[in-house]
Amino acid sequence: MELPLSPEAREALAQVERVAHEVVGPEAARCDRENSFPHAAFEALRRDGLLAMAVPKEFGGMGLGLDGDPLAWTLALELLARADCSTSQTFQITGRCLTYFAEMGTEAQQRKYFAEALEHGKLFCSAGSEPSFHTTARAERRMPITTIARKTRGGYQLDGRKHFNSLAGVADWYVIFANLEGVDDPLRSLTLFVVAKDNPGLQIENELGRDGDARDGDQRVAA
């Protein structure tokens, strides 16, 4: 059966398959041995413009992300996973963050962060998971997101801890899930904050790579 893919999607998938075969696969064993991030793989993805897959077309991207063409996006992740599951996971994480902006961001935010990906090849980390999510306790006893966002002069201060965050220590931007202090309604409280990697309040713990980066790691945030 022929899959219902656009010519643009087929071309992008051919590029992904080539990068997976030529760069991602050959680098995978070394990255596993050294416990290091696949920098060469992401440089190849960046060079071929594939970080633009999840950016909507109206902002200069391919429009092939989860919100634009979920079939093409899923096939791209499968091609990468055949070569290296960790590269596929981290690629989908940065793409997922771009989908957050596509679906929920203001136009100003979309222009800013899509440009970060398109023009500068920046990577994004989704920081939602918390230690209380991963427990043997029954579901009704598990804690919700406990990271708190307190209003300050000129912005917010975040206080909390995240873990199992792929791209921790490598990403340029962190999309952090937090609840607004004093807001009881969960539909109004849960908010996504974008924090730069050089924010002095952002700390990365339990880094996995010898070169200071990680595929998955803990984050303590107070930004």
Image: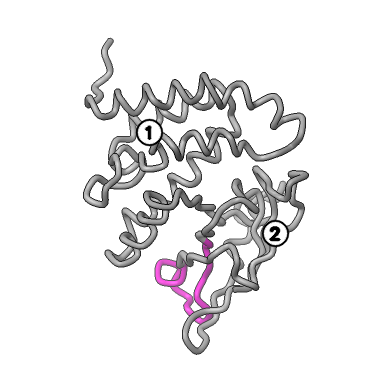
Query: Residue 70, located in which quarter of the rendered image?
Result: top left
Estimate how packed mark 2 is, as few (under 14), some (14 to 19) or many (20 or more) residues with alpha carbons within 10 Å. Answer: some
Indicate whether residue 187 is drawn in magenta. yes
Q: Residue furthest bottom?
A: 153
Residue 138 sits above or below residue 183 on the image = above
Residue at (50, 52) in percent of width and height = 124
Residue at (28, 10) in percent of width and height = 1
Q: Is residue 172 left or right of residue 169?
A: left
Q: Which residues are magenta?
A: 176-190
**Residue 203 horizontal/vertical position (percent):** 69, 64
Q: Amino acid at mark 2?
A: Ile
Q: Is residue 149 left or right of residue 64?
A: right
Q: Amino acid at mark 1?
A: Trp
Indicate whether residue 13 is drawn in magenta. no
The reply to whether the C-beta atoms of the residues labelled 2 and 1 are less than 8 Å apart is no
Q: Nearer the viewer, residue 18 or 174?
A: 18
Question: Element under label 2?
Answer: strand
Q: Nearer the viewer, residue 3 or 54?
A: 54
Query: Residue 49, located in which quarter of the rendered image?
Result: top left
**Residue 97 horizontal/vertical position (percent):** 44, 51
**Disc on res. 204:** 2
For the residues labelled 2 and 1, the Cα–Cα distance comes to: 29 Å
Q: Nearer the viewer, residue 91 or 116?
A: 116
Residue highlighted by disc 1: 73
**Residue 218 horizontal/vertical position (percent):** 69, 55
